[in-house]
Image (cartoon, rainbow, N blue to C red):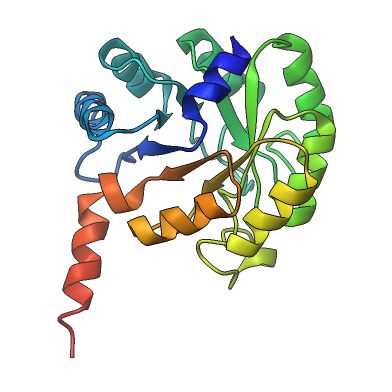
Amino acid sequence: MQLDVLERIRGGLIVSCQALPEEPLHSSFIMGRMAVAAQRGGAAGIRANSAEDIAVIKSLVDLPLIGIVKREYAGCPVYITPTLQEVDALAQAGCEIIALDATQRPRPDGQSLESFFARVRANYPRQLFMADCSSYEEGMAAAALGFDLIGTTLSGYTPYTQGAPSPNLPLMATLVKNCGKPVIAEGGIWTPEQLRLCLDCGVHAAVVGTAITRPMEITRRFAAALLP
């Protein structure tokens, strides 16, 4: 089952269909239709946020799904699948892959990533887990901990990686060379040309979100080009 999922996304485009509560398209119905459009356009997989959105998407499309739950906890910078509660919800939703923050930052209950992931893996030994990382060191550490896929999702989003190139091609290339796990390119991919460059680094697959599924942000980019 795991190998089948990895083969289905190999060399492919994973489309992130997400909208936060403050965004105009926040709706499980709309995200479901976004996923249908992505599948018809040639997507190999979907990345989605929340068990509610995932349930609708899985009822409409037959693609491997990377699931996350974005939830903020007071005083904690980690918000992508931060606790076992979110992992449980995603497992029950039937996500083929569950992604979680694998940065060096402390989690809401003060646990280290090592102790947290040990519990997660013990509870779900057959589940595929993706590490959302921001740096080479974090990617290598996540691979050593037993994550199944290593993502560059958070490059540039942690205080110690601000100013990193976007998309971070050097990070992708070094992780592909050294981590021993499938690498998922994610973050800052705005054009088909950039997507091709990511795949040329040897990554297993690539996630594109904002450039495809967030029309408010796309419009802002075009509108900014009109400013004096």
The x, y position of residue 53, in whole percent, is: 33, 23
Left of 126 or right of it: where is 152? left
Does the image show residue 24?
Answer: yes
Residue occupying the point 54% across, 47% down: 185
Q: Considering depth in this image, is 49 or 4 the residue closer to the camera?
A: 4
Q: Quadrant of the N terminus?
A: top right
Where is residue 9? Give x, y as percent: 48, 29
Res 61 quadrant in image: top left
Residue 170, above or below 42: below
Relative to 35, residue 222 above or below: below
Count the labels in the image. Answer: 0
Q: Residue at x 55, y 38 (%)?
A: 80
Name which residue lies at 62% across and 49% down.
77
In the picture, measured across the screen, residue 139 lies left or right of residue 188, that is right
The quarter of the displayed image where residue 36 is located: top left
Residue 201's place in the image compared with 45, above or below, is below
Q: Residue at x 34, y 59 (%)?
A: 191
Left or right of residue 97, residue 60 in this image: left
At which x and y percent is residue 123?
Answer: 73, 10
Q: With 95 as the anchor, is 113 left or right in this view?
A: right
Asked whether the viewer can see residue 97, the reply is no
Residue 44 falls in which quadrant of the image? top left
**Outermost residue, bottom direction?**
228
User: Looking at the picture, how far across and down is residue 131, in whole percent?
Assistant: 66, 37
When the figure is inspected, residue 32 is found, relative to residue 198, above or below; the finding is above
Q: Relative to the observer, which residue lies in front, 22 or 58?
A: 58
Q: In which quarter of the image is the C terminus?
A: bottom left
